[in-house]
Amino acid sequence: MKTWVVLIVLAAGAAGGFLYYQSTPAQASSELITADVTRGSIVETVQSTGSIEAVTTVLVGSQVSGSIKSLYVDFNSQVRAGQVIAELDPSLFETQVEQARASVVKFEADLDRAKVQVDDSQLKLTRSRELAGRQLIPSSELETAESAARQAQSAVKSAEAQIVQATASLNQSQVNLNHTIIKAPIDGIVVSRDVDVGQTVAASMSAPTLFVIAQDMTQMQVSAAIDESDIGRIESGQAVTFRVDAYPDDQFLGTVRQVRLQPVVEQNVVSYTTIISVPNPELKLRPGMTATVTVEIARADDTLRVPTGAFRFRPTAEAFALLGQAVPPGMRGGRGEFGGRSTSRGDATAPRAVSSSPETSAGPTGLWPHGGGSGASGGAGGARRAVEDGASVSAPGTPGVTTRPVWVLNAGRLERVEIRTGISDGIVQAVVGGPLEQGSQVVTGVTEAREVAAQRGGNPLMPSFGRRSRGGGRR
C-alpha cells in the first residue's frame, strides 16, 4: 500500500512540474545566439566533376579491309613510334600487286610495238615522198602515208599514258599491301585493344579502331564541366585539388590550363569544359576515372573571419527587451533596421549568405556548391534582399570589398558596427576593415522558447547541458 502511495505522489509531482514548465513564458527562455570572430584562412572555391584523360590519345585504325593475321601487342603494352603492332592477311593485296605489275609490263610492250610502227610509217612516208616527186604515184597515196605516220605517233603517246596509269595502279596496290602492317604512330602505352586474331575489319566507309594508345601516362589532364554561373571566375593558372574514388584518402593537385569557349548544353544546363593539367608520377591516375574537382578562386590567410549568419541577423524590439536595452532610434515598428525583416533563428554555420546585387557590391561574396549562393540569385529580388540586409556600395578602387553591418554583443549590450568584408567560403567571410577584433562576439540570431525546450530534450525533469545564456554567449 505504501508503494502505491509513493508512486502516486511521484506521478503527481512530475505532472505538476511538466505543467509549470509548459506555462513558462517564451520570453523567459529566449536567448541570443552568438559566435566568436576568429582568425585563420578562407579559401573561395568552385566545385565540379570531371573525367581523367591522357594528354594525347591516338586511335590506331586500319585503312584497308581484311582479317587480322597477327597481333604483337596487348593491353598495357609499351610501344615505340614505328613499331609493328598488328598485321592483316596480305594475300589478297599481294595478288593485286602482281596484277598491277603485269599490266605495267604489258603496256611497256605495247609502247615498244607502237614505236616500231612509228619507224615503219616514217620509212613508208619517205618512200612515198620520193615516188610522188617523180610523179610515179598519185598524191592520194602520199596523203595516206602521212596519215599513217601521224597515227603511229599518237599510238606511242597512248601507250606511254597507259604505262603511267598502270604504274600508278601498281603503286596504289603496293601502298594497300603496306597498310596491312599496322604500326604505332607515337610512343606510349596501349590502353585499349578492340580486335583479336582472325577477326575481319571493314574499312570501306570509315577506318575501324584497332588500338587506343596514350602517349604519356605521367602527365594527365582532367576535363571538368564548370557551370556557366561560375565560369567567369575560372582562369588559367589557378590551383586545383581533386579526389578520385579509387584513392579516397589521397588529394591530387593540378592547374587550370585551358577554359574552352565551346558551350555544352545538357537538359538546358550550360557548362564549359575546363582542362586541368595533372602530374601523375606514381601512375595512380588512370583514364576514365571520375574526379571531384575543387578550383581555388581566391585565398586569404591569417585574416579575421566572421560567420555569414551574422549578416542575416536583424534585431527586433523583443531582442532589445531581452537585454533590458532601449530600442535605438531608426527602428520601424520593431521590424529591424532599415525596415528589414527580423531574424528569429540564427545559425553561425549555415551555408547560406546574403549577397549584394551588382548595384551594391563590387565582387562576389561567397561560393555555394550545387549552383546556389551569393551572386546566383541576382536580379531585382537579390537587390531587394541586399538593401534589406544593409549592404552598401563598395569603395571605388576596391573591387570585391563590401561594407556591411553586423550586430555585436559588447558588455551585455547590442551594438551595430560597419565592417568591410572580402571573400567568403559560404561558412565564414573575411573581414578586411572595421572595429571587429579576434574574440569579438557577433550575434547570429535569437532562439525561441520552443527551440530552447527542444535543445533541452523536451523533458523539464532532465538537466540541460551547454545552454545558451540570456543575452550572452554559451556557458
Image (spheres, rainbow, N blue to C red):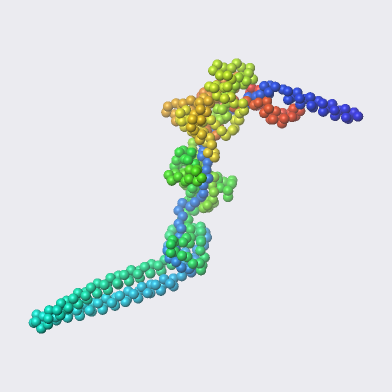
Whether residue 108 sits left or right of residue 308 in the image: it is left
Q: Residue furthest right?
A: 1
Q: How many numbered marks appear?
A: 0
Residue at 45 percent of width and 57 percent of height: 58
Instruction: Give above or below for 113 relative to 391.
Output: below
Instruction: Give above or below for 89 relative to 436.
Output: below
Residue 367 position within the rendered picture, expressed as x and y whole percent measured from the top left: 52, 36
Instruction: Give above or below for 67 relative to 435.
Output: below
- Quadrant where the C terminus is found in the figure: top right
Q: Who is closer to the viewer here, 129 or 256? A: 129
Residue at 29 percent of width and 72 percent of height: 162
Instruction: Give above or below for 197 relative to 450.
Output: below
Whether residue 451 sits left or right of residue 248 in the image: it is right
- The answer to whether residue 59 of the structure is visible from this angle is yes
Residue 302 position within the rendered picture, expressed as x and y whole percent measured from the top left: 53, 32
Residue 248 position within the rendered picture, expressed as x and y whole percent measured from the top left: 59, 46
Residue at 84 percent of width and 26 percent of height: 9
> Image quarter for residue 257?
top left
- The answer to whether residue 278 of the structure is visible from this angle is no
Residue 406 position within the rendered picture, expressed as x and y whole percent measured from the top left: 55, 24
Q: Residue furthest left?
A: 134
Q: Who is closer to the viewer here, 50 or 145? A: 145
- Quadrant where the N terminus is found in the figure: top right
Residue at 64 percent of width and 26 percent of height: 447
